[in-house]
Image: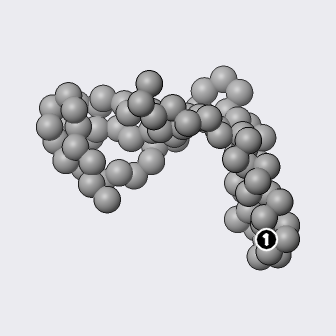
């Protein structure tokens, strides 16, 4: 998926960047031309751990549980 930068009009692939912030990470798009940041969401440190656990299991019940926990560790930051 491509997104267009509001600041300079450049189109780029919407690959999520992860920036460390206090207490976790921030997920955002970054325009490769002008470096404008578009925040998408914030994830707590616990969320990062959960995401790692999700990548390490194939058990459906465990996955469902981990994913519902993960949801609570993510704050949507779009449109702010
Ligand atoms: Zn730009």
Q: Position of residue 37 (x, y in %)?
A: 37, 30
Task: Name the outermost residue toward the left.
Answer: 9
Q: Is residue 8 left or right of residue 38?
A: left
Can residue 50 be seen here? The reply is: no
Check the image and report above or below for 6 versus 13.
above
Q: How is the image coloured?
A: one colour
Q: Which residue is disc 1 drawn over? A: 57
Q: Position of residue 13 (x, y in %)?
A: 30, 54
Q: Quadrant of residue 38?
A: top left
Q: Residue at x 83, y 60 (%)?
A: 65
Q: Position of residue 12 (x, y in %)?
A: 25, 49
Instruction: Label 1, secondary structure: give it.
Output: loop
Q: Is residue 40 left or right of residue 43?
A: left
Q: Quadrant of the C terminus?
A: top left
In-front residue for pair 69/19:
69
Q: Position of residue 73 (x, y in %)?
A: 72, 40
Estimate how packed mark 1 is, as few (under 14), some (14 to 19) or many (20 or more) residues with alpha carbons within 10 Å: few
Check the image and report above or below for 68 versus 20.
below
Q: How many marks?
A: 1
Check the image and report above or below for 41 versus 59.
above
């Amino acid at each position: 998926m491509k997104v267009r930068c509001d600041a300079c009009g450049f189109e780029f692939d919407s690959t999520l960047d992860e920036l460390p912030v206090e207490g976790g990470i921030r997920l955002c798009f970054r325009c490769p031309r002008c470096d404008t940041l578009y925040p998408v969401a914030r994830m707590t440190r616990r969320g990062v751990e959960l995401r790692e656990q999700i990548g390490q299991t194939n058990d459906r019940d465990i996955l469902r549980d981990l994913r519902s926990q993960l949801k609570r560790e993510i704050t949507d930051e779009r449109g702010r």
